Image (cartoon, coloured by chain):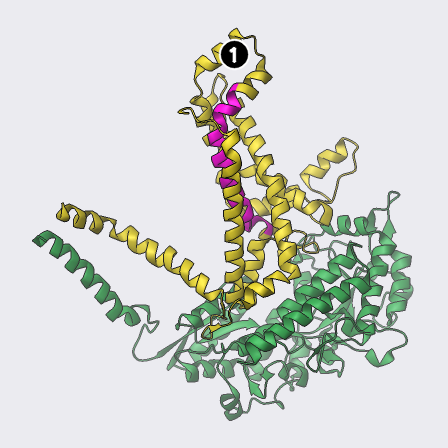
Chain colours: A yellow, B green
Amino acid sequence: MKKDLRIGLLFALPWILGFIIFLAYPVLASLYYSFTNFSILREPSYVGADNYAELASDTVFHKALINTLIYAVGAVPLSTVVAIGLAMLLNTKVKGMSYYRTIFFLPSLVPMVALGTLFLWIFNGDYGLLNEGIRAANLEPPNWLGDPAWSKSTLMLISMWGCGQAMVIYLAGLQNVPVSLYEAADLDGAKLGKKIWNVTLPMLSPVILFNVVMGIIGALQVFAVPYVMFPGGAPARSTYFIASYLFDNAFQYQRMGYASAVGWVMFIITLVLTLLALKMSDRHVHYETE
Amino acid sequence: MNWTSVGIFGLAATLVVGAVVTGERVISRQDRTDRVTVIYWEKWTGSEGEEMRKVVNAFNESQDRIFVKYLSISGIDSKTRLAIAGGNPPDVAGIWGDQVVQFADANALTDLTELANDKGLDENYYIPAYWDGYVYKDKVWALPSTPAAIALHARPDLLPPEVATPETFPKTFEALDALVEKISVQGPNGSLKLAGFLPSNPGWWNWAWGYYFGGQLITGDKVTIDTPENLRAFRWIAKYTKKFGSKEVQSFQGGFGNFASPQDPFMSGKVAAEQNGVWKANYINVYKPGLEWFAVPMPYPADRPDLKGRSNLSQDVLCIPRGAKHVKEAFEFLSFVQKQDVMEGLCSAHGKNSPLAKVSEKFFDTHPNKYIRLFDQLARSPGAFNIPKVGVFPQISNEMNVAFQEVNSEQKTPERALADAQQRAEIIWSTYRKQVLAQ
């Protein structure tokens, strides 16, 4: 038995070492650094809770936090609705469905930086493809990139582009819904809307919970696309998010201690929101085994 | 434990010990024993990078003791900092001049004072305003690769004939405003077709507007963002937004192409005049050859003729990161770049003016920018100014950008925007003094 344990540990050693060196140590080190003044190039000096106290009165941090929460509130439901909608469409029995599924999944494979560059062209206020379409419909298009009132909405719309991953998970969930439930609903005379509301969504609820939790975590970490499309959080910090503020403090302003504190506050916020989502799920999520 | 387990553990232990023992040798950049290899990281890519490579090649051919290995690196500032922290920095790093103070405060640079003095590279060798950019706390931290000065560029084909020459072009902000009013074109729905001038274009020096009105961002050790002079500058900026309409300006600017392309607003004829650097001529020569243009000094307020000839200076510099393995050899390369003929060749190829006090007539005669003498004069003018010498300049510059965007999008009044920027900058500066300068 002991021999098996040793051999098992030996095989697991690369992962254990990787976990300790690349995850556990940095996480613990960042917790320590969050209580220090650390510029990377000098030894860290202990400052107690000063970094956290500064965060409490830091108006840019507050602005970035509010931006991030607004983005999450807009992007997560939007992506969820679109992903479920697409999954339902791709769950129908149509000829060549495997091709459609591949096509709808492909956009989520586009690298974030390429995506940002692509959307700079599509959302351009003057000659962008989207505004050309809006003008063709005789409507006055907004300035998606330059107007602070529209910049976050632009990013929310862009977030839909990556919903292919969630769509695939919803699709797998939909295929696990027992056909007998739909047959029973048909016998009761339920229409499509009733079937979706009373059968599909309840049966899909564990998958929705998983995707929403992952979506919240992802939305709170939004970085690459706004970094490429809206340098410095322009216009007027309307697209300045927590991850951007963390990056700037760590790598532009050499305030690694402060950036660590930002990271830990964000971790706690993410944890609280995740626990909240799990708690709220008690009443709304139905497991087949229950 | 059986022999197999012992063997696997032994192999793993050997690999780890081997990596530790040979690590330094494995990461060493010395490819030959008969010469020292100096590693040089530079931010430039494309044609600018190639011109610097030519300088490196010329240095390598000029002697056989030192070989400079040139590497174009993106994100050079953060990568250099991390390499210094990791104890294996390059021997030479080409950073931006506005990072010298920040790097020096962070203990990231090698003091070059003695080495520079020994080679006669002192304040007499350089144009004073540029030299000021290499010195901080009485020590020399960097030497130039190429410098720049800023001027107003104008297109005569988009101007009325009476102001279409450098001599007749408006000299004051008031006269410029009147010209802009006269030549700008807006469609029936208010959409801009041609802007005589826009303070938000190209948007690279939003922090500097106050200086053209007599203001400063830092005075002594105080943040002075909300002074009457800076406020005057921001009121002037707000006037343009009001004149054209915030949405119209934003939409118009949204259609501007990249500055390094024929879709650049100046080259494509969307703006008749713009603030830009000495390098602009190079881009025009590449992307819009044959375009008629001229350069004049930036305007000054009519009631402040003492502010005539102001120019925002910027430069690219070479430094030796702290912990560099071959400081002496690296400095030999730096001093090679400072030779008048080498420097003039590089600056000319980059379309820049020279940072050196002594400039040859050949440099002026063969330079691709026909207004190079103007930029040289602006750099030597008492009105030439650098960024404030504080390590928090990146943050302060960000605050000024935000204030500018808030005013430009009519989100805040100039008073409110500058008051907020002042408040933020004061906190940033005070924290920096406590956490960095007091160390």
Tell me if A78 is positioned left or right of A99 in this view: right
Q: Nearer the viewer, residue B358 or B40?
A: B40
A160 to B290, vertically: above or below: above
Q: In the figure, residue B283 lies in which quadrant?
A: bottom right
Secondary structure that dominates the magenta span: helix
| Residue type beneath disc 1 | Ala
Q: Is residue A117 above or below residue A209?
A: below
Instruction: Classify residue B299 as left or right of residue B60.
Output: right
Q: Which residue is mark 1?
A: A185
Q: Chain of mark 1?
A: A
| Residue at (74% x, 58% y) in the render | B405
Please name the residue shown 25% across and 52% down the image: A13
Q: Is residue B347 visible?
A: no
Asked whether the viewer can see residue B239, the reply is yes
Give the vertical position of A50 relative to B365 (above or below). above
Q: Position of residue B209 (x, y in %)?
A: 77, 69
Is residue A212 covered in magenta? yes
How packed mark 1 is, by other alpha carbons closer than 10 Å (few <14, some 14-19, many 20 or more), is some
* Residue range highlighted in magenta: A199-226
Q: Position of residue B238 (x, y in %)?
A: 83, 60
Quadrant position of residue B136: bottom right
Secondary structure at numbered mark 1: helix
